[in-house]
Image: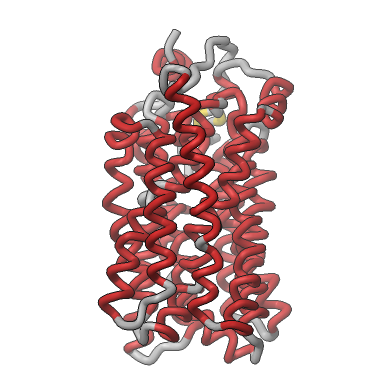
Amino acid sequence: MSIEEINQRNLILSDRQRKRLFIASCVALATTAMVFSVRAAILDDLGAHFQVNKELVGIFAGKAFLGFAAAILIGGPLCDTLGIRTLLGVAWLLHVSGVLLTIFAPSYGVLESATFVVGLGNGLVEGVINPLAATVYSDQKTHKLNVLHAWWPGGLIVGGLSAYVLTKLGFGWQIKMAIILIPAVIYGVMIVGQKFPATERVTSGVSARQMFREVLRPMFLLLAFCMVLTATTELAPNQWMESVLRNIAHTPGILVLVYISGLMFVMRHFAGAIAHKISPIGLLLGSSVLSAIGLFALSYAYDAFTAFAAATVFGIGVCYFWPTMLGVTSELFPRGGALLLGLMGAIGNVAIDRALPLMGKIYDEYGAAQAFRYVTIAPILLVVIFGAMFVYYKARGGYRAVKIEQLGQARQDVAP
């Protein structure tokens, strides 16, 4: 029986209900992205307000990704037990409380804690919406995960432009943080009283023991290492974009980040067609090549034209990294379910947590451009790894998604 037939037989969800859950997931992800872009826009303001250097700014910013990693690592497997609805509600509470705590933080220590709380909310969202999308659209995983993650750059655009406009109008960083509450309230309202499905792993009858076994598969371990490199390449430079480009290119880096996000928003809607033609691994290989070229070029940007030109190549390069890595994981290891998707997200965020203060230290000691230049090592390594994987799968007849054959009793987490 196909996965589509499993969904039809086991999930009591109409197309309208699935669409509402998917849209709520998109808004929740946009909220996490707004946190990211607004924070990027106010990093220098926060450093000045709390009187800390760039390395400490990087450490505080990294707390969000550490919280993200912790929540997604715990939240992924808990989707199977506590249910998707419960965890998404907890994520909403963490988002709201973390943003408010940030706004009213009296000290750098409190700011660190608040950033960690917001990161927990971000991580739970990521840990929940990925298996949710993979379950309700299990026959279109790579495509739907890319469409879902188009709302990451969508949120970056909204947050970045809002922060830029508020700066021009003379508002402080606290008001900029407060705008994050708007999409948070929207997705909170959208999930009230809704039915949520059990995850694909549960509906297919795969045991927890089988799920944990998938963690030790050699190919998954290789993908996990690649996630360290893809996450570092995409998200660490983006967080420093405003500060670095204002320094070396005399250009508002937040507008460059918005531009990159616009490219990503549009292109992620076409991921399915591209992956179908060249395979997801081929897509990741091409992305690695462009990312390396674009990031290296960004480190040499000296005006608005060179900054946006380099950002175009970089944006196209990093566009498909995160959702395609999740799509490949879900397609090659469906028995790993929410656990493996959560692990991938956690690994990526721990990598960013480590990279941000390192970039800040390089910034302090050697200069802004060097902070970008050093990170270029990551996509260069990815070209080698994904190139080898592409050859490996081609020799075996091509990349193919794995289907779960064993079925089990379906469960459903239903709103009371």
Residue 59 versus residue 137 in the image, above or below: below
Say which residue appears at 63% left-offset and 84% top-offset: 365
Count the marks: how many? 0
Q: Quadrant of the C terminus?
A: top right
Residue furthest top as drawn: 1
Say which residue appears at 33% left-offset and 89% top-offset: 169
Whether residue 331 appears in this view of the structure is yes
Whether residue 117 appears in this view of the structure is no
Left or right: 76 with respect to 273?
right
What is the x, y in percent for residue 74? 69, 44
What is the x, y in percent for residue 352? 60, 60
> What sort of colour scheme is used for the picture?
secondary structure
What is the x, y in percent for residue 40? 48, 74
Say which residue appears at 61% left-offset and 41% top-offset: 224
Left or right: 157 with respect to 321?
left
Of 201 and 19, the residue lying toward us: 201
Say which residue appears at 64% left-offset and 86% top-offset: 53
- Name the quadrant containing residue 259: bottom left
What is the x, y in percent for residue 269? 29, 44
Residue 177 versus residue 385 in the image, above or below: below
Residue 311 versus residue 220 in the image, above or below: below
Left or right: 31 with respect to 275?
right
Q: Quadrant of the N terminus?
A: top left
